Each structure stands twice: as structure tokens, then as C-alpha cells.
Amino acid sequence: MIEIVKNPDIDFIGKRKYGFTFSAIIIVASLLLIFIKGPNFGIDFTGGALLQIKFSDAITTADIRSSLAEIGKERALIQSLGNEKREYIIRAPEEKPVDFSNAVKSQLATDFPDNPQEILREETVEPKIGKELLTRTLWAIILALGLILIYVSFRFDYRFGSAAVIALFHDALFTIGVLILTQREFSIVVVGALLTVIGYSINDSIVISDRIREKYKKMRKEPYNVVLNAGLNASLSRTILTVGTTLLAVLALLIFGGSVIKDFAFTLLVGFIIGTYSSVFILASIVSVWEERFPKKKR
Amino acid sequence: MRNIGLRVGLVIFAVLLGVYAIYPTIRLYTGKNLSSKEELALSKRSIHLGLDLKGGMHLVLEVDTTDLNERPQDLRDRAFEIIQNRIDEFGVYEPIIEKQSGGRILVQLPGVDRERAINLIERVAHLEFKLVASERLSDVLEKIDKYLQGEDTLAFQEPFTSYLIGIERIDMGIDVRDEDSVSALLAQAQEVIPEDLQMLFGPKETYQGREIKRMYLLKKEAELTGEVIQDARHQPSSGQDLQHLGSWEISLEFKREAARKFASITGRNVNKRLAIVLDDVVQSAPQIQERIPQGRARITGQFTAEDARDLAIVLRAGALPAPLKIVEERTVGPSLGRDSIESGLRAVLIAGGLVVIFMLIYYSLSGFVADIALFLNLFFLLAILSAFRGSLTMPGIAGIALTIGMAVDANVLIFERIREELKIGKTTRTAIDQGFARAWVTIFDSNITTIIIGVILFLFGSGPIKGFALTLTVGLIANLFSAVFVGRVIFNYFTYKFDVRTLKI
């Protein structure tokens, strides 16, 4: 029998101040990023155009940029895909995305007649549509969070429920922070990935809370922190195994999934790692602090 | 073991049902030499590939209601019907055309030529027959020149007429490069152009090595409009005109009443020129030789067979009540679609392969049970998608990969629990029963929250998100069955049958 951790007995709760310190730092950093730099919304939400173009021969970003400069579009985002320097994504938030898209296509065709281009993907979104989508997405997120809160509050006692919700925001904020830091674009797909991260975070909290609750019933005489530690340790190998297999899947997506899925997989990667961290180092620690300040009467 | 026979039977029944559901999909995508009728029948019971995987365009159109008094809803409904007709006649395989809120129309066309499709949908196709006011041309041009000179006292400004090029003695034209300045001058001199007349251009053409557009002075009021058309067909150029040799044209047939009207118009205006104007572009302006009684006309020009066919389609389907604006477009070329399928499948296979191997190593023989459950999970996921004609998109493939990752969670929870029970000295059978029973509560809870998110994403999310939500939600539901129920049946069956004392886990 292979075991990742043999009968672990780690004092997670005793070391909770490290976890709290680390989390405080990353959350403050993420909040600063969110409020100072702000998320870089993609054309799904701002409106704009995206062209994915494949050239017959290699070409540099600078060449494309100087060609676009002739139509005053040198500020468009030009991103190279793959190692061949043939495939590029050009995108820009625009008031009139269709005009932009057509102008770019004809400009490139005129400037590089000997290097024919194939349009692999073309997306245009009017700003109006983007705004509508943003509103709709925000409502979807609010609704999802609301339902989860309801579920958690009737499924758990309020301490674990609240701790799970804090962990959820912790994970979401950190993931958003990393996305801003790495200058990823907030597209509709990335928002979907963020919601998945939230689902995963809650999922982890539930598994661990369940375990702690079970231990609590068996260990009535023990101090509360011992019970919390026992629960965390009992579920530790599951936590590691699950995050391991899930990350295997996500890494496969990230490495082999192609350009469309990259940002999506990256968001999941960051979110799942932080989600696992918070369920081990933050969730029960919050409950332990709570118990120390406001002890529960014995049931 | 209680009911073991019944439960084994249930699993076999579910698998058979799955095979039945999934068979058309497998046949559709791997079968060779399928007749198109077979293909159609199969596709009604198969998983569909999303536009991002097979290539195609997704358009959201909005009716431009700026200068119309009609209710946007009504306009949209009329435009919807016309677009539907056009697309039907164009012959696209499995198009999706839907009305959306806010006076919008959603059009999804798999695997089409983008430019052609947009032209087909977006073209208003407002056809008019207008008389050419040749006799008043010189007068109007003179007035324009004089007006522009008078307004701008700079004597060196070039007169309007200096832009004009004579073409074949009968027509005037302008260089395409001058189009913007000419239009600006015309707009400036609008007030000297008589109320009943208008200047319109022809399509771009090459004349003596230059790119030009012909320019016509027309009577503003149309003699006839496109509503009178009974039928429109494309055909190879039939006239003696050398200019159009080898190109195509559209023959029009008028409705009965309009035919009479057309006869009288042509009869009254012999030797005059009648312009055929499509969406304010003069297609041609032939001279009327004699009264035309048959109610037929031809639109000639530099049309390729494709152009002519598409134009005939839009003329038959009728003009749009108002211009349409593309407010959202997502088009994926076929080659990117192929790449996406390949990379998506590769990602899923690698993710699945790694997980399968890992489970085998970590849990040995029990890991094999987990792998069977994992395989069944994917199998049921695809079977359910087939049964409900679900569509598979690139984010959907990502959802499948994620399902693989999370499906294992259920097995891990169960197995870790069984191990614990064994450690505290329970017998194999009790350990299995307790392990499954204890883990079930947790598995159910944790899957439910993710399913909640999935359902909301599916209901409120747009395009790309929907595909992801669909596979993830269906996958997790399938997981509850395959990991918990089927897994337990396998364990129970084998420990019962072979009287297993020590479990390899």
C-alpha cells in the first residue's frame, strides 16, 4: 500500500498565525492590485474586436505594429502564438469593432502581399453588448454566491459556514490578483473559470468540515483545537490526492489545450492551489479563533 | 449480499441504455460512406460539434430602427423571416436562427464562407428601377461647379467636373480614389441638385487600367421596386455585350400586375435609360430599345456565378425592412476548429491517461475499479449528451477534463475511508460498506455545490460558458452514479463472489 502521508499528526492550528500572516499579505496585495490596477477586461465585456491571423511566413510583432500604425491602430494588442512567429492575435477595445476588423484585415493584406494571411478567428462585440454581458455575468455570480450561501448555511453550523465563505472570497480575490499581476485578460471564459474555482473552494471546505464534525462527535472530551487538527489530518491524504489528480488534468489542459483554453486553465490552476491551501490552513483556523473568543456551550 | 443481482442488473441496463444512446454519435463520426439521408437521421440523435470546433460563424444582428416608426419587434420579426428564407435557399447544413430579446436575431452557421454569408444576411436587397435623367446632366453639373466656385472664393479650387472621366461616350465616372472627395463635394452642393433628382454610383470596375465607379444622375422616384418580383434566377450572361462575356447575370420575372406596369413604363420611355439600383448602387443602366411586355428584366454586371446566385437568393427572399447591424460576431475558421479538436482531445486523453495510471499505482487493484468508474463516467457523459443532442465545444472539452479530475475525488474519498476502516481492524466487507456510506454524504455535498454553479452558468452564461457548464454538470451527475453506485456494486460483487479477505487498496 502506497501512502502519501503516513498517519499524519501535524499541528495546523498551532501554526495558524503563519497561515493568517501569509493570507493577510496576499489578500492585501490582491486588493491593492484590484483597486489600483483593476482587472483588464477583455472585448467580451468592453466591446471590441479580436482577430487571430496565421501568416504563411514568419513575421515580427514590430512589423505588424508598424503596419497597423498606418491606420492609427498601433495601440492594438498584438500577441504571438506558438513558436513559429506565424500566428498572431490582434485585439483592441473599439467603439466600432466591425470597422476596425475590416480595416486591419485590408491593411495587412496590402502591406504584406507576399505573405498571405489566413483568418483563423474573428470576433467583434459592440460595446453595448459587452455591457449587457457584464451585467448579466455579475447577476449570475451574485445568484451563484447567494445559492451557495443558502446551501452552506442550512448544511453547516454558522461558524463553518462563515469560515467557508471567507475562504471562498480569499480564494477568489487571490486568483483575481494573480490574473491582474500576470496581465491576463478577463474574458467571459475566465469568469467561468473563476466561478469553478469558487465551486472547488466550497467543495474542499465541505469535505474538511464534514471530517471535523465527525471527529467532534467522537472526541467530545478533547480540546477543540485537537479535534480540528484531527479532522484536518484525517483528510490530509485525500486533500493532497484530489488536488494532485485535478491539477494533473488542469496541467494537461494548460500544456496541450491550445490557445483558447490557456487562460481558462491558468485560472483554474491558480484557484485550485490557493483553494487547497485555504481549506487546510485557513478554514479551521478561523473556526479555532472563533471558538477561543466566543466558546460554544457544550452541546 | 442483499439485492446484488438486482444492482448488477441495473448497472448492465444503464450501460446498455448508454450504448444505445451513444451509438448514433459513434456511427456518425467514424462511419464511412454514409448517405446524406443516413447522416441526417444520425445527426438527430448525436452529439453536435460546436462552431468553435467545426468552424463557422455566430452572429447577433440588431435591426436598425433609427428612422422608422414601426415597432422594433415587428421589424425584427419580418427581418427574421426574410433571413430564414435566404439561409434556407442558400443551403447551410444545420443553421440555427433564433429571435432574441431586444429586437435581436441570432444566426449560427457552421462551416460557411464568411464574406459570402455576411453579404447574404446583411444585404438589404432593396431593388429599384429608376429612370436616368441624361438630358439634365450637363445642366446639373454646371450648377454644381458654379455653386462650389462661388462658395469657395479660392479661384484655384478644381471644379467638380474635373474629377469626371468620360466612359464609352455615354457614361461619366470617377476614380475610386477620388470617391470620398467627390461625395463630400456632392453633399456640399446638395441644394443646387433639383429635388427630384439624385446622384448615385455604380459598382467598382476597371476601365482602361483604372479603378473607377460610374456616376449616374437619376430620377429620385422609383418606377418599380423589388416587391414586384415573382422570381429571380442566376444564369450565364445572355446578352451580346462583350463587356460581360463569361460573367453571370440575374434574370427577373415580375408579378402579373407589375409586368403590365413595366410594359407601360418601357413603352413610354423608349430610348431613355432605365437604371437598376440595388441598395443605392446602380448595377446597370441599359437603354430601353422598345416596350417590354413579357414582364422580364435582367441585371447584368461583373458577377461571378456565386455572386449571381447569392443575389438571386436575396431578391427572391425579399428586401429587409430595415438595415441590420452585426452587434456580435464570433467566427472560427475550419483549420482552427480542427486544431482545437486535436489539442482538446489530446488534453483530455493525456489528463485521463495520467489519472488512470496514477490510480492504478496508488490503489493497485482497487485503482482499477476506480478507473472503470472513471471510464463509465465519461461514457455516461457522452451518452447523455448524445441523447439530448447536446453540443460539444472547446470549453466543453475543458469541462470534461475537469470532470475527470474531480470524478477521481469521489473515489479518493471512498478509498481513503475504506483504508481507515481497515486500519482500525474492520473486516473487508464491513470496511467497504462503511467506507462507501461515510463518503457518500461528503461526495453528495461537495458535488451539489459544483452542480449549483454549473446550472447557473448554463442558464445565465453566454456561448462559451454554456458548453463548459453543460459538460461539467452532466459529468458530475454521471459521476454520482458511476463512482458511488457502480463502484460499490463492483466491490460488493467481487468480494462476495471470490470471498475476498484482504483487499488490495
Image (tube, coloured by chain):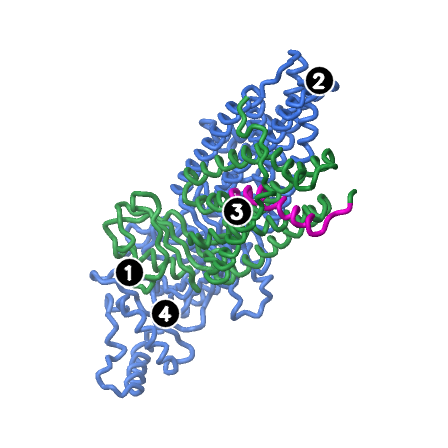
Subunit of label 1: B
Report x, y in % for residue A248: 48, 35
As measured in the structure, the alpha-carbon distance from the residue carrying label 3 to the one carrying label 1 is 51 Å
Amino acid residing under circle 2: Gly
Dot 1 and dot 4 within a common chain: yes
Magenta residues (range): A271-297
Q: Distance between the Cα atoms at labels 2 and 1?
A: 80 Å
Label 2 SS:
helix
Label 3 and label 1 in one chain = no
Secondary-structure class at tag 3:
helix
> In the image, is B419 to the left or to the right of B53?
right
State which quadrant residue B128 falls in.
bottom left
Q: Residue A270: image x %, image y %?
A: 49, 45
Residue A193's label in the rendered image is: 3
Classify A247 as above or below A192.
Answer: above
Measuring from the top left, give residue B34's x and y in whole percent. Answer: 47, 29
User: Going 52% across and 57% down the picture, which residue do you hit?
Assistant: A28
Nearer-the-camera pick, B283 or B3:
B3
| B307 versus B292 height, above or below | above
Q: Report if the CB atoms under discs 2 and 1 are less than 8 Å apart.
A: no
Q: Is residue B393 magenta?
A: no
**Residue pointed to by mark 2:** B5
> Could you tell me which residue is drawn at 41 percent across and 68 percent down?
B130
Horizontal side, residue B282 vs residue B405: left or right: left
A97 vs A86, left or right, is right
Residue name at image x 66 percent, y 48 percent:
A148
Viewer-nearest of discs 2 and 1: 2
What subunit carries mark 2? B
Q: CA distance from mark 3 to mark 2?
A: 42 Å
- The residue depicted at 44 percent of the width and 40 percent of the height is A254
- Decide which of tag 2 and tag 4 comes sooner along the chain: 2
Residue pointed to by mark 4: B200
